[in-house]
Structures are given as C-alpha cells and as structure tokens.
Image (cartoon, grey):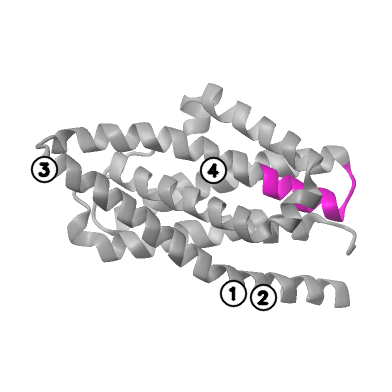
Amino acid sequence: MVKNRSKVSHIITELGAHLPYSIFGVVIGIIILGILTFFTVILRVEHLLQDATEELFHVFHPVHILLSAIVTTAMFWKHERHFMKTFLIGFFGSIIICGLSDILLPYIGGKILGRQMQLHLCILEHPNIILPFALIGVAVGFLVPGAIEKSTEFSHSLHVLVSSMASILYLISFGMTEWIHVIGGVFLVTIVAVMLPCCVSDIVFPLTFTDSSS
C-alpha cells in the first residue's frame, strides 16, 4: 500500500514538473508551423501545405516512436531486469501511446473543433516505416538506461518537441489545413495530445508495471 502511494505521489510530481516542457514544446511547434504556413502563402503555394505537412508527419511520428521506445524501455529496465517484459512494454507502449498522442487525440480534437478529420493509422498503413524505429528504440533503451537517466531534462525536452510537431502536423495534414483562425483550439488540443500520452509513456506506464521499487 505504501509502495503504491509512493508511485502515485511520484507520478503526480513528475506530471507537474513536465507541464512547462509540454507548453514550451507546443509553442515552438506552432511557431514552426506558422513559419511554414507563411512561406506557402507568400509563395502562393497554399495548396501544397497539406502535402508538405503530411510528408513531415511521416518523419516526426516515427522519430517520436523511437524516442518514446528508448525512454520507456530504459526506465522500465532500470526498475526491473526482466527482458521479455521490458521488451513488450517498450515496444507496444511506444507504438500505442505515440499513436494516441500523434493520431487519435489530434483526430478527436479536430472533430471537436468542427473539422472533417481523416483517421490515418501509420502502424497499419506504413508498418515498414514504424517498426524499425520502435525496434531500434527498444534496443537503445536496453543499452543506455544510465545515460537516459542522466540526460532526462534534455531527452524529455526533445521528446516533447517531436511529439508536439507530430500532433500539430497530423491536425494540418488530415483535416485542418485552415488552422490559423482556430489557433487557440489547436494549442489546447496539442497540449492534451502531448502532455497526457508523453508523460504516460515516460513515467506512468513503466512505473505502473514495475514490481521493484529500486
């Protein structure tokens, strides 16, 4: 019971500490997208914005899976030295939670904002893109758990920025090309899409499934 309370307390503390990173990452993502949109307008190629963001999404989403697999695997392996359990947590955790962050939550958010969103599940449509990143991420997580722990601030900042870009790019690519006039909604949707799954992946998911408290 005491152990469970300790885990819950740790999770709540970590979520609060990571909120500023999430806000910062989303703001940077919106600025980058704003610059990209600006250039498509002045070059009079607005029709290319959706194609450009879709291509970029298929870069940021697998990279997000890579980073998530590294962090999730490393954190779990640090707490519990069970190879198969760690592999399954790192592999499926990264794919499921990044899919939630980058695809499902932006899809639902876009629907709430009144857009006709397209559901595009990369793991089903492009497994050849997703699987290598997930497998390599898990392998790295096994090899460098100590290095990940020492670089928590940097690795989480990078993770949040990549997650923010993937979520925003999905919104634009699959239903919300005209996004400037609903930028407030985009900001809120992306904060939820980044904060919840990203922290669950890095903190809640591995700690919930560990048996040891070391």
Asked whether residue 72 is drawn in magenta, I would say: yes
Rendered-image quadrant of the C terminus:
bottom right
Say whether marks 2 and 3 touch (CB < 8 Å).
no
Q: Comparing marks 2 and 3, which lies closer to the viewer?
A: 3
**Is 117 drawn above or below residue 205 in the view shown?**
above
SS state under label 1? helix
Spot occupied by residue 101 in the image (x, y as percentages of width and height): 49, 51
Say whether marks 2 and 1 touch (CB < 8 Å).
yes
Q: Which mark is residue 13?
A: 2
Q: Comparing marks 3 and 1, which lies closer to the viewer?
A: 3
CA distance separating discs 2 and 4 = 24 Å
Could you tell me the amino acid type at mark 3?
Answer: Ile
Say left or right for 197 vs 12: left
SS state under label 2? helix
**For mark 1, what is the residue?**
16
CA distance separating discs 3 and 1 = 40 Å
The number of numbered discs placed on residues in the rendered structure image is: 4
Could you tell me what secondary structure mostly forms the magenta stretch?
helix
Instruction: Tell me, yes or no, if residue 74 can be seen here.
Output: yes
Name which of mark 2 and mark 3 comes first in the sequence: 2
